[in-house]
Amino acid sequence: MDIKIQSIHFDATAQLQAFIEKKVNKLEKYCDEITSAEVVLKVVKPETSLNKEASIKLLVPRADDIYSQKIADTFEEAIDNAIDALVKQLQKNKEKTRGK
C-alpha cells in the first residue's frame, strides 16, 4: 500500500511518520484491496488544546473512498481515533459486499 503523509504548518518527525505507517499498514488486515492512503496532519489554532487534526483517506477499488478526520491533543491520539473509525467503516463495507 502506498502511504502519502502531508503535514501542514509543521514538519512531521520521522518517529511520527513511522507511527502513522505502522498504524495505516495494520488496516490491510481488514481489507486487502486498499491501494493507497493519504494522511493529512494539521495544527489548527496553535494556542488551544485539541488542536491536532488528522485526516486519513483510503483508496479502495470497487468501493467508495473511505475517509476519517479526527481532532485531539496529540497527533498520535488523533491518528488512533481516525484509525478506529476507519476500521469500523472497513468492517461495514466488508459486510455490505458480502451481502451482494
Image (cartoon, grey):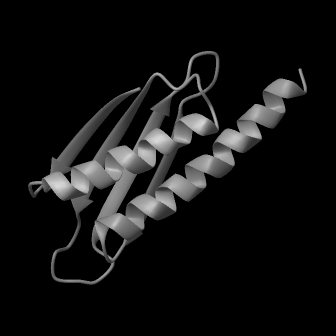
| Residue under the point 40% across and 59% down | 79
Image quadrant of residue 90? top right
Up/down of 11 relative to 38, above or below: below
* Quadrant of the frame with the N terminus: top left
Q: Residue 62 at what x, y percent from top left?
A: 64, 16
Q: Tell which residue pokes out farthest to the top in this image.
A: 62
Residue 82 falls left or right of residue 93: left
Q: Residue at x 10, y 58 (%)?
A: 10
- At horizontal 60% and vertical 37% (from top left) the residue drawn is 29
Image quadrant for the C terminus? top right
Left or right of 42 on screen, residue 77: right
Please state the horizontal and vertical placement of residue 26, each as a whole percent of the image. Answer: 50, 44
Give the residue displayed 44% in from the left and 39% down from the top.
25
Towards the viewer: 24 or 82: 24
Taking the image as shown, residue 41 lies to the left or right of residue 77, namely: left
Query: Which of the 4 image quarters holds residue 11?
Result: bottom left
Q: Percent from the top left, x then y, of residue 65? A: 54, 30
Residue 50 in the image: state x and y as whole percent. Answer: 33, 78
In the rendered view, tell whether residue 78 sits above or below residue 57. below
Q: Residue furthest right?
A: 99
Count of picture labels: 0
Q: State left or right for residue 32 relative to residue 9.
A: right
Which of 91/32 is in front? 32
Vertical position of residue 77 compared to residue 56: above or below: below
